Image (tube, grey):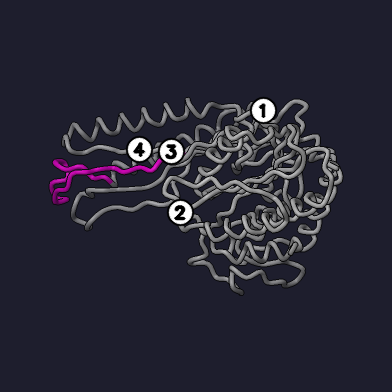
Amino acid sequence: MTLSARALMERLVSFPTVSSDSNLELIEFVEGYLSSIGVDSHRVPNADGTKAAIYAHVGPQVDGGIVLSGHTDVVPVEGQNWDSDPFTVTERHGNLYGRGTCDMKGFDALALWAVTLASQKELKRPLQIALSYDEEIGCTGAPPMIEHMISNGMPRADTVIVGEPSMMKVVTGHKGGIGYHMHFHGFEVHSSLLHTGVSAIMMAAKLIDWANQVNAENAATPVISINADFVPPYTTLHVGMINGGTAHNITAKDCTFDVTFRVVPGESITLWRARFLQKVADLQAEMKKIHPDAGITAEQFFVLPGLAPEADGSAEAVARQLTGANDSDVVSYGTEAGHFQARGYSAVVCGPGNIAQAHQPNEYISIEQFQQGEAFMAALIERLS
């Protein structure tokens, strides 16, 4: 039994695939649905088998097709004030509310619906769908999925459309990124003997202050043309959460936090990594001068290539033709398009919904935007037929 695009979104949203939890029930549904319309699919499990990506191919076994790329995970709803069940699509005031309706199960549903349409046609060029996991925690599920697609002989597409919410505008560039889990190991003493101990929190504060200084320096540096359209037009460092300490009168033994970078395409992630790790090494040396057991652990948990605008890229050409757009945009958030481009695909970001709604309580996609997405998919299938 085939489902409408909206029915597919309702089913996908009903699975609470928060990144901290498994997405396998959703993957099983997608796998079963694709099988029911005669489309074979391939799972790509993560290391411990608790999550999986899935991809599929419909049409002739030839190169030159189009990939519709999305992710299956969503951000948490805890602590947010929702007016309706976040895992049930609810229509109000011309909008469809629910976690993931905008980011990005709305697009995932449209992509599955496009595969449904494609399965009923005699395509001249193939359509492929690729749904990943763990995008929300650093796009870590996409690289093994892409590698599996390439190494297992799926015909090589020449265009990837990543459907992150862009209001159906064609996005040809975004920042890259890198992130580190930081653990400062201090040495506990009574705070009256502060000079004999190492406060993990106070040393961590030096690294966080360094991040603030770097942000200020970057903001004051003249903008080069390749980065001029980004907001802000420079690389930024960010610390969003911090934990540590035992009591107000004990030098903190531990302090943990994450540091993330959003790197403009005109700069090197490799060089930023080296600069950061040198600062970490300098601080660690300062700590060990006081006590040899003190130190810092820096664990990289993601790296995301930026998406660079392509000269005469096929993905941009296709997306412009299907949307009627005459220009393109760049954005400061990261997507899996950077990973596809790094593996040699032509890639753009183009999807329904407004990124301002992503991750918010009462997340929604407007019905008008969802309908634009349907029109896009219908035109895409006609293009491939």
Q: Is residue 203 left or right of residue 337?
A: left
Q: Residue at x 75, y 29 (%)?
A: 313
Secondary structure under the numbered disc 4 in the rendered image: strand
Q: Position of residue 187 (x, y in %)?
A: 18, 44
Q: Which mark is residue 226?
A: 1
Is residue 29 visible to the viewer in this orientation of the structure? Answer: yes
Which sits in the foreground, 379 or 152? 152
Q: Which mark is residue 86?
A: none
Report the span colored magenta: 179-200
Q: Position of residue 76 (x, y in %)?
A: 51, 61
Q: CA distance from mark 2 to mark 4?
A: 26 Å
Amino acid type, callout 3: Ala
10 Å neighbourhood of mark 3: few (<14), some, or many (≥20)?
A: many
Which sits in the foreground, 372 or 281? 372
Q: Which mark is residue 50?
A: 2
The residue labelled by disc 3 is 211
Secondary structure under the numbered disc 1 in the rendered image: helix
